[in-house]
Image (cartoon, coloured by chain):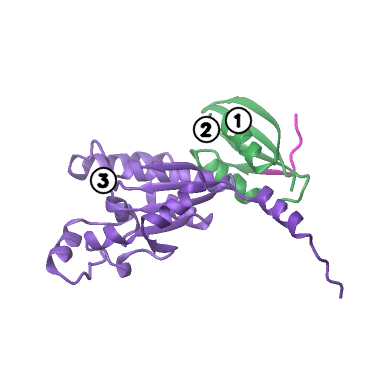
Amino acid sequence: MIQADVKLDTLGYFCPMPIIMTLKKIKELTVGQVLEVVSDDEGIKKDMPAWCDTTGHQMVGLEEEQAKSGMIYKAFVKKTK
Amino acid sequence: MTITQTDPAVALANLQASKPEKVTIVLLSGDMDRAMAAFIIATGAAAMGMQVTVFFTFWGLNTIRRKGAASSAKDWLRRMFGLLNAGGADNLPLSRFHFWGLGTKMMKVVMKQNRMPGVPELMETALELGVRFIACTTTMGLMGITKDTLIEGIDQFAGVTTYLAEAKQGSVNLFI
């Protein structure tokens, strides 16, 4: 289990909204804090690491969870700058 | 007060290192699905810290026209064309399965149910993220589209050389 400082719910939103919501949220964090992005869009598994690669933030981990409505993905991003 | 002087060479190196990548998109189509693809790419790229420019020409201009704004072109032929060619980001037809509006309406219902942003919402997000909009003046003239009938937030009214100057520095240049 990774401990997150802030949680962002993007359930029900499709690409590119989870990434855009992440961008907006991460601006509110302080350097070193970890943001947990919860999504049910499978694309986030590839998109979040790609976003971290280009923006320089650190992808700390990804968790998958089987929920009643389907799979839920939790991406953990550490603000680096 | 102390003034710190930066070495110009260091400043240049810093600037080059921090220079964001450029993305340009030419939107020629006025189809809803194509416009959606263009704005999804534009907002995605902007979210990744890239500098994005969208160049609107021909039917693509319909996406940045205000709904219901009448053309104020000088000659009646162009005014007529502006009237027949309805604009507005919310008013774009699907490239396939439009079915006189029914197919597009159905698609919009499905999108709303799935909380998917439509063209107007994506466009708003794009502007919010600093995506620059350029309207092609040549096709605006051709199609009887005047500046006063376009939405606010258009960065420039320009032509092909402006686009090429941008595209030359672009790492991703798309024509949709």
Task: Specify the farthest residue to the bottom.
Answer: B1
Q: Give the left or right position of residue A3, taking residue B156 as reference.
A: right
Characterize the local packing of mark 3: few (<14), some (14-19) or many (20 or more) Cα atoms within 10 angstroms: many
The chain that hosts pointer 1 is: A
* Amino acid type at image mark 2: Asp
Give yes or no for residue A6 being in the magenta stretch.
yes
Quarter of the rendering occupied by the N terminus of chain B: bottom right
Between the residue at mark 3 and the residue at mark 2, the CA separation in whole angstroms equals 27 Å
Secondary element type, mark 3: loop
Above or below — where is B86 with respect to B46? below
User: Residue A41: which numbered mark, if any?
Assistant: 2
- Labels 3, 2: front one: 3
Q: Look at the image and tell me whether residue B175 can be seen.
A: yes
Residue at the spot 54% in from the left edge and 32% down from the top edge: A40
Residue ID for mark 1: A73
Between the residue at mark 3 and the residue at mark 1, the CA separation in whole angstroms equals 34 Å
- Provide residue B22's location: percent of width, then percent of height: 53, 47
Chain corresponding to green in the figure: A
Residue at the spot 32% in from the left edge and 53% down from the top edge: B57
Secondary element type, mark 2: loop
Residue at the spot 60% in from the left edge and 30% down from the top edge: A73
The magenta segment = A1-7
- Provide residue B123's location: percent of width, then percent of height: 43, 53
Residue ID for mark 3: B93
What main secondary structure does the magenta stretch of the protein show?
Answer: loop
Chain corresponding to purple in the figure: B
* Amino acid type at image mark 3: Pro
Q: Give the left or right position of residue B156, taking residue B66 as reference.
A: right
Q: Nearer the viewer, residue B134 or A40?
A: B134
Between the residue at mark 2 and the residue at mark 1, the CA separation in whole angstroms equals 8 Å
